[in-house]
Amino acid sequence: MREPENIQAVEQLDVDMLGFIFWPGSPRYVGQIYPKAGSLADDLSENGRYEAKKAARVGVFVDDNPQNIVAHVQNCHLQYVQLHGSESPMIIDSLRHLLTPGIRIIKALSIGSPADMERYKVYEGHVDMFLFDTKCQSVGGSGKQFDWSVLNAYDGSAPFLLSGGIGPDDAERVKGFRHSRLAGIDLNSRFEARPAVKDVSALRRFLDEVR
């Protein structure tokens, strides 16, 4: 998310999380419009302009240094840090040590085959949640799907978010997916009118059908 009015409209759909990308290589990078993203991540839903459930703010980072991540967490009042690069468990532990207690860490893993699922074991005990996304050349946001059946091999203790090209026509597929550790779904590129701007009507229809 990036545009204030769009953030306001999406939050009114009673979503649980809103994502803010702090990686300069992304077309959804918050810094392209807002060098200081504090109003995006916090003030917008506290200034009395509208009433909505306060969705958790998630900062998405790619191989950033822990000190820089912590600065963004503090400045933008983020509740989650999503790591979408090749961050090692050691780096994650260093980040955890610097973060205020209560800030949760999500590790995104790219999945293309059953063998890719084995990577989660390296991060068990180091993160609070996983996000399983489609394996591709870019860093997420490809709009491509992967075979969700490979997730049957996941037997870790951490909950996970299902990602990877979920679009407006996938409500039945989402409702048909079952896993005891599934915590939610990630909706991004296939619900965009343009990068960082969600099609609110499409989101509303999809959420109504899934719920």
Image (cartoon, grey):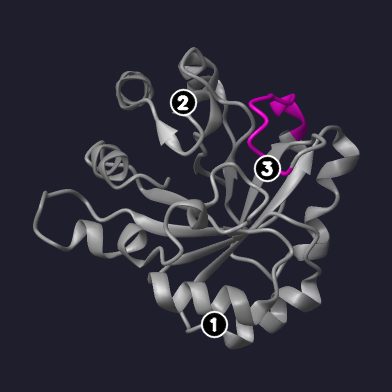
Between discs 1 and 3, the one toward the N terminus: 1
In the rendered image, residue 113 lying in the magenta stretch gets the answer no
Q: Amino acid at mark 2?
A: Phe
**SS category of the residue bearing label 1:** loop
Instruction: Work out how far the residue at label 3 is from the one at label 2, CA to CA, in angstroms.
Output: 18 Å
Q: Amino acid at mark 3?
A: Phe
Residue 137, disc = none
Pick the front one: 122 or 139: 139
Whether residue 211 is visible? no
Instruction: Work out how far the residue at label 1 is from the one at label 2, CA to CA, in angstroms.
Output: 32 Å
Q: Residue furthest bottom?
A: 97
The quadrant where residue 137 appears: top right
Relative to residue 110, is residue 7 drawn left or right? left
Q: Magenta region, mostly helix, strand or loop?
A: loop
Taking the spot 21% from the left edge, 51% from the top edge, the residue there is: 53
Q: Amino acid at mark 1?
A: Leu
In the rendered image, residue 140 lying in the magenta stretch gets the answer yes
Relative to residue 25, is residue 52 drawn left or right? left
- Which one is in front in this view, the residue at disc 1 or the one at disc 3? 1
Q: Which residue is mark 3?
A: 132
Q: Which residues are magenta?
A: 139-150
Q: Which residue is mark 1?
A: 99
Q: Which residue is mark 2?
A: 191
